[in-house]
Image (cartoon, rainbow, N blue to C red):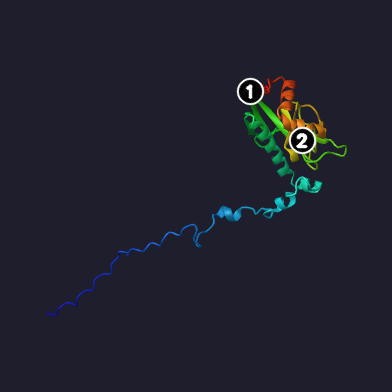
Amino acid sequence: MRSRAPVPPAPSTRRSPTRRQPFAHPTSSSFQLPLFEHLAPRTSVPPPGAAYDDLAAYPHVSTAVLAHHACLIGQAGAAVVDSVLLARGIPVLPAPDGQSYDRLALIRGDPVTVQIKTTSHPGADGRYLWNIACGYRGSPRGRRPYARHAFGLLACVVLPVSAVLFVAPGATRVTLHPRDVPGLIRDPLASLRDALDAIGIDAPQPPP
């Protein structure tokens, strides 16, 4: 009797375990930016130090430099107003974008909106001048007066000496003689008390 040849075993259908690749840390060279990073529009960024190079000698800079960095000058003026009010116990908050005022001050419990204008040099007649208008030249609506009740107080800043003249709203131009600046520095709330009295709000009284 003939013997049968041994049947070879069928190949196994089990898959050998694959070795997992180690996780690529985001800081490694294999990390890919998300898709939106590739699609995001590229914006031009001013070279580092450009504003410092232009403004390091402030206020002894040209009108063109002041105009070019008007946003920074305006922020500096708003910081002066914040300092004057906060240092004297008056809470002040920045306004949301797109409002007709720059700050919201809480004066003896009354919320008062404040529009801030900043200047750096006296005008041709020797006086500091603030033109109280909104908008900008070249915009569709151009420069125009503020609407009535657009803000509760006006703060006019002489930035080089950190002086603030507070004024009741309504004027389209405000001027200040340089001889009056020392008084604003000596008593920063004097003009605030006058302006608040003009709009019918109890002002903080000076210390005895």
Disc 1 vs disc 2: Cβ atoms closer than 8 Å? no
Query: How many circles with numbers are drawn on the protein?
Result: 2
Which residue is rendered at x = 73% and y = 26% of the image?
190
**Dividing the picture into quarters, in which one does residue 34 lie?**
bottom right
Q: Which residue is mark 2?
A: 134
Toward the left, the furthest residue is: 1
Which residue is rendered at x = 63% and y = 23% of the image?
108
Q: Say left or right for 159 vs 28.
A: right
Which x, y percent locates residue 192? 72, 26
- What amino acid is labelled 1 in the image? Arg
Element at label 2: loop
Element at label 1: loop
> In the displayed structure, would residue 2 be above or below residue 78?
below
Indicate which label's residue lies in the foreground, 1 or 2: 1
**Dividing the picture into quarters, in which one does residue 147 lie?**
top right
Which x, y percent locates residue 42? 65, 54
Which x, y percent locates residue 177? 83, 33
Q: Earlier in the sequence, mark 1 or mark 2?
A: 1
Q: CA distance from mark 1 to mark 2?
A: 29 Å
> In the displayed structure, would residue 135 be above or below residue 40?
above
Quadrant of the rendering where the C terminus is positioned: top right
Q: Which mark is residue 108?
A: 1
Q: Nearer the viewer, residue 30 or 152?
A: 152
Which residue is rendered at x = 64% and y = 32% of the image?
87
Q: Nearer the viewer, residue 150 or 64?
A: 64
> In the displayed structure, would residue 78 be above or below residue 151?
below
Which residue is rendered at x = 74% and y = 49% of the image?
55
Q: Say left or right for 126 vs 163.
A: right
Density class for disc 1 (Cα within 10 Å; few <14, some 14-19, many ≥20) is few
Toward the right, the furthest residue is: 125
- What amino acid is labelled 2 in the image? Cys
